[in-house]
Amino acid sequence: MKENARIEAFSDGVFAIAITLLVLELKVPPVASIHSMRDLWLGLYHLWPSYFAFTLSFGILLVSWVNHHYLFNILDKSSHHFLYANGFLLFTITFMPFPTALLAQYISTDYAKPAIAIYCFGGVINSIGWNLLLHTIIKPQKLIRSEVSIKLFNKIKRSTQYGFVIYSIATIISFWFPIIALIINLLLWIVWITLSITEKSNEN
């Protein structure tokens, strides 16, 4: 349990850094370009791609952090396989600020498709990280507490597998219908937040 606490504390630090990097992409309009209050309002309005990209990525990281925290509540040990899988998951988390910045920069331009495709691909590799992590929890040895229902764990695993499929579909769609791909990303984390709250309420 002490070892798991250290792993979770380190992971929380990585999540915090990733979220901090996201907010650093929100740039205020330079003073030199502002000559009236109207200019400032317009400057803030033109930052909408940054607001959108930040909100979308923050939602994804929030869902990941909540699920990561919940996962550690049902574990009572760790393994080398788990440590490396957790490290890969954190790698996908720290990658998120890059496609976020790319999306914010290009979503309102004629070059939006590649930026949106790379952003969606970020969701794919994050899903791969989650699937690897969950796999190491049951193989080569079970790391979950004895009182935790294996049926509950399998339910979590299935939802993660569905997430990988949906993110992969969104990435493919982004080459032809980029806005629809972004809507899929947005709806996916909203659904996961709703399901997480609903399941927690049912447990209580």
Image (cartoon, grey):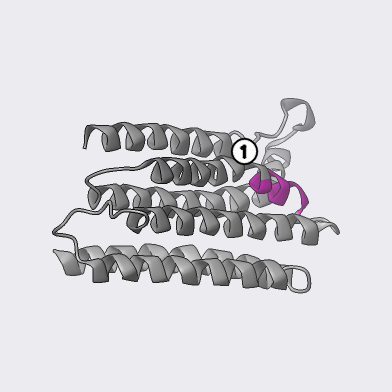
Side of 168 where 114 appears, left or right:
right
**Residue that mark 1 sits on:** 26
Q: Look at the picture and state if 161 lies above or below 44.
A: below
Task: Give the class, few, some or many, for how many residues have Cα within 10 Å of label 1's Cα (few <14, many ≥20).
Answer: some
Side of 202 where 169 appears, left or right:
right
Q: Nearer the viewer, residue 28 or 6?
A: 6
Q: What residue type is labelled 1?
A: Leu
Q: Quadrant of residue 158?
A: bottom left
Q: Does the magenta stretch include residue 104?
A: yes
Of helix, strand and loop, which one carries label 1?
loop
Residue 45 visible: no
Residue 152 visible: yes
Q: Nearer the viewer, residue 157 or 176?
A: 157
If the image is split into quadrants, where does the C terminus sit?
A: bottom left
Q: Residue at x 74, y 73 (%)?
A: 177
State which region is magenta.
99-106
Q: Residue at x 21, y 37 (%)?
A: 1
Q: Look at the picture and state if 9 lies above or below 177.
A: above
* Residue sitting farthest toward the front: 140
Q: Residue at x 38, y 62 (%)?
A: 193
* Position of residue 148 measured from the top left corner of the image (x, y, whole percent): 18, 60
Q: Which residue is drawn at 34% across and 38% down?
A: 8
Side of 18 where 8 appears, left or right:
left
Q: Nearer the viewer, residue 140 or 176?
A: 140
Q: Is residue 67 magenta?
A: no
Q: Which of 189 and 73 is in front in this view?
A: 73
Side of 86 where 164 appears, left or right:
right
Q: Main secondary structure of the magenta part?
A: helix
* Position of residue 53 measured from the top left corner of the image (x, y, whole percent): 62, 51
* Position of residue 166 measured from the top left corner of the image (x, y, whole percent): 56, 71
